[in-house]
Amino acid sequence: MKQAIHPSKHTVIFMMGVSGVGKSTIGALLAKQLEVPFFDGDDYHSKANISKMSKGAPLTDLDRHDWLHALNALATQQLKTNSCIIACSALKESYRTILETAIEASTKWIFLHGTFQQIKERLQHRNHHFMTSDLLQSQFDTLEIPQNALQIDIHLSPKEMVTEIQKSLPIKTQFGLIGLGVMGKSLSRNLAQKGVRISMYNRHVTEVEEDIAINFKKEFKELASALPFDVLPDFVKSLETPRKIMLMVNSGSAIDAVIENLLPFLSQGDSIIDGGNSNYNKTKERFDFLKSKGIHFIGVGVSGGEEGALKGPSIMPGGDIKAYQQVQPFLELIAAKDKNGAPCCSYIGNEGSGHFVKMIHNGIEYVEMQLLADVCTVLKAKGNTSDQIADIFEQWKPTTNSYLLEITSTILRKKEGDDWLVNKIMDTAGNKGTGNWATIATAELGVPSTLIASALFARYTSFYKAERVAASKQFNSENITVPKISIEDLHNAYQFARIINHYQGFKLIQEASEHFKWALNLSELARIWTNGCIIRSDYMIELVTTFKTTNNLFAHKNTIQALKTRKSAIKKVVSECVLIELPIPSLSNAIHFFNNITTANSSANLIQAQRDYFGAHTYQRKEDDTGQFYHTDWKLNEPEKPTAHGNTSN
Ligand code: 6PG
């Protein structure tokens, strides 16, 4: 859908001039270009006026009075919701005063003019028009040349006239982007390619970041109508109100610095959209702070990396729903599309919910990445080369495809010289913080998202490279055998662990939704993760339907069946890897968590007893469902009745 190039927000353009000059033709053409409504003032004459003019009698000021007020009322009404163009002769200054009553600031005059002869010839070739050429002279006699109008000579072609008019319009842009890094540039190009007129800003830092926006504009033809800035107030002024400004800057203090610099230039009702990987708690703080200033703050998770941002990311907006609705057309326009063509962009919930679910997206992503790394560890130990592992992954695609499986296959095939590039990369995995925040969130919410923590700590462990090398010399067994693991068992183990990963990830989101009262929709969330984002997969497509029937994956028959059939495989794989000392942190955590969560009577009773022994933290009894807590003086050796304690949780 081509976005309209609108004049500055809600402007009425009066196309004026004597009859036959082409007001209606040019007005309609301009309206089509700007995608705004067009109204022909002649349609608003009374029957008496039309009858009078058709008999060749000129209209008096009195005849015109009601007509002019009717057009002013039309313009005023239109301005409430949109810009518009009205063709009207408006020959006298007094007529124009009536037409722009109470809307002067939103009115623009375009005066089409030509010679008497030019126009007479035109009129003589126009039929079915109630104005005869004999009246033309009285029109010219009545005409008072407007002082504040753009004058357009009708010797130009209609297209040239429209172009000239457009150049003069204070065309404001529809959407602003701040921060032209990798993601900011991709999103800018995506918006521009969809016909959105954007303003782009990048700070000026002498000898570090100079002319970033202007040079970026020159690189891509789709940015031809984009406006580049490195002066913030000019950037803000270029935007139509209410403004929509998307920040694509590093999370943390940079966001607050940009907000502080923006605030003096913003108007009530403007929206700031944070498209970075910001912490959801900070997003809530910024949401509340800006709300007190009358500014909307929308925390938007954007997933898909550089390519996704350009071709269509998955977009997770959270905040005030009315504010979201103002930016919704733009975000949906640039988002990836699901298999039914619907945008992978959907309002998530209030406050920081958008950034929260993006954080958990990244947590699930960490695990998916670690599971692939664990699988590669086993396949490598079985003697497969990178190419051979990629071949195996190709065989898994029909039943287990995902974006991460695809890119991992590509990565494994990349050679440098006669070795594979991946073998030359230092094995210390970095992170920008989202997996860390996800693990903190799971601990704060008391939800056992053990896989996210296992994947995060696997990265942290990898960073102790020197310590690992030293320890390997001390502790690694000599006679490490080749793992007795079949490809089929490994594939089933991988699929089993992926189910556990998605179970934990969505469980954490559901718990947060209840805790923060966000009322999140898991099926809709899975839908916007079926394309554009890093964790898109065939399994995610399946979850869209699954979450329509339950929020608990473990209660769904397909999941139960899938886990049951694959459980023996992962037990074999993990047991074998433990025996031959192969590190598979996330694969192994999956089965350990599963064994834990499927144990009806666990060892936690002993934990309670220990806590009560040294801390008198009390415990509940299996046979007592009243919620009563008990304490025992464990040091006394004769049997005694435990003393009941208040119904307080310890
Ligand atoms: C995405 C990615 C993106 C980014 C991560 C990388 O959804 O597009 O997750 O957000 O690549 O920040 O995270 P780490 O640097 O923590 O691995």
Image (tube, rainbow, N blue to C red):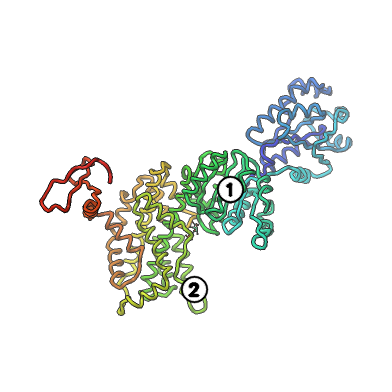
The part of the image, by quadrant, that contains residue 494 is bottom left
Regarding residue 600, the answer to whether it shows in the image is no
Name the front one of labels 1 and 2: 1
Q: Which residue is mark 2?
A: 421
First in residue order: circle 1 vs circle 2: 1
Residue most toward the front?
636
Relative depth, front residue between 59 and 260: 260
8 sits to left or right of 268 = right
Q: Is mark 2 within 8 Å of ligand 1?
A: no
Relative depth, front residue between 206 and 101: 206
Residue 56, percent across and down? 84, 24
Residue at 31%, 66% in the rendered image: 489
**In the structure shown, which secondary structural element does the residue marked by tag 1 occupy?**
helix
- Residue 46 is tagged as none
Q: Amino acid at mark 1?
A: Ile
**In the structure shown, which secondary structural element does the residue marked by tag 2 occupy?**
helix
Q: Is mark 1 within 8 Å of ligand 1?
A: no
How many neighbours does mark 2 have within 10 angstroms: few (below 14), some (14-19), or many (20 or more)?
some
In the image, residue 587 above or below residue 621: below
In the image, residue 38 above or below residue 414: above
Q: Amino acid at mark 2?
A: Leu
Residue 179, percent across and down? 60, 54
599 sits to left or right of 582 = left
Regarding residue 598, the answer to whether it shows in the image is yes
Residue 92, percent across and down? 82, 28
Q: Which residue is mark 1?
A: 259
Residue at 41%, 41% in the rendered image: 517
